[in-house]
Amino acid sequence: METERILLKKCLAELIGTFILVYIGAGAAAITILLAKGETWQSDFLCKGIGALGGLADWLSIGIAFAIAVAASIYIFGHISGCHINPAVTLALWAVKRFPGKEVIPYIISQLIGAALASILFVIIVGKRAATDGCCGATALFPGISYAQGILNEAVITFFLMLTIMALAVDERTPKQFAGLIIGLVVGGGIITTGNITGASFNPARTFGPYVGNTLFGGPNLWAQFPIYIIGPVIGAIIAAFLYTYIAGLKT
């Protein structure tokens, strides 16, 4: 009974942490699109607005929002659940035997629920235009980017994220006081650099939430691209976890 209660608390932490991530981060992306609505677009991208007018400044703002959300969640919930807030991170930690297999599914379900609730609440507050015009801040391929290129980009940026997590959150030899800040900044940097490639998800849950919001409230149907944001992040995270474990000589 006590074990189940502890797992419930961890899952609640994962749910709320992922909620914070999607509400603030994806919400910032949606608001960026809404602010740009009505202008002349330079892109055929379905969710027009991000990067079309503000250029890198758009992605800088969104990246900062995500960095703050990630850092805050880690400092709030890191000592409770580890603050994965990302199914790819959970699977990678399990793969290198740093996370119990019996908790993988509950964690992932909690992350997906938190992401979906964040997008739903965001639309309720902002109105249906958050979905129909703002696409709930969903990630999608930009013009000229193929499916394979999208998967590769998501794998690369998640590889960087997971290396940072392994070094600062998993490796007991490194100082922890700035772990949340640095991990958040890595996410922000990846978004600023590759936002105009795939939307820079790093995270199946981050993409899942806005897709659910779009489905429920009349936004674009982007589900055909969802495998990109599963395959890429999971592959990148697992490779990084094994590589850091080997290089750093961590026990498995």
Image (tube, rainbow, N blue to C red):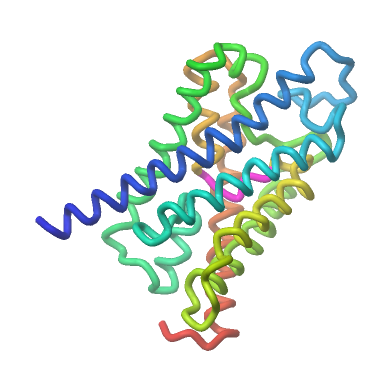
- Residue at (76%, 47%) from the top-left corner? 194
Q: Count numbered badges in the picture.
A: 0
Query: Looking at this view, is 225 or 77 the one in front?
Result: 77
Specify the quadrant that holds the N terminus: bottom left
Specify the quadrant that holds the C terminus: bottom left
The stretch in magenta equals 200-204
Identify whether 244 is placed above or below 41: below
Q: Residue 46: x percent and y percent?
A: 73, 23
- Residue at (65%, 53%) from the top-left corner? 187
Identify whether 231 is placed above or below 51: below
Residue 32: image quadrant is top right
Identify whether 160 is placed above or below 223: below
Query: Looking at this view, is 165 or 92 the one in front?
Result: 165
| Residue 12 covered by magenta stretch | no
Query: Looking at this view, is 183 or 225 the one in front?
Result: 183
Instruction: Specify whether 155 is left or right of 210.
Output: right
Q: Residue 140: x percent and y percent?
A: 68, 35
Main SS, magenta residues? loop
Identify whether 70 is placed above or below 240: above
Q: Residue furthest bottom?
A: 249
Q: Residue 211: x percent and y percent?
A: 54, 29
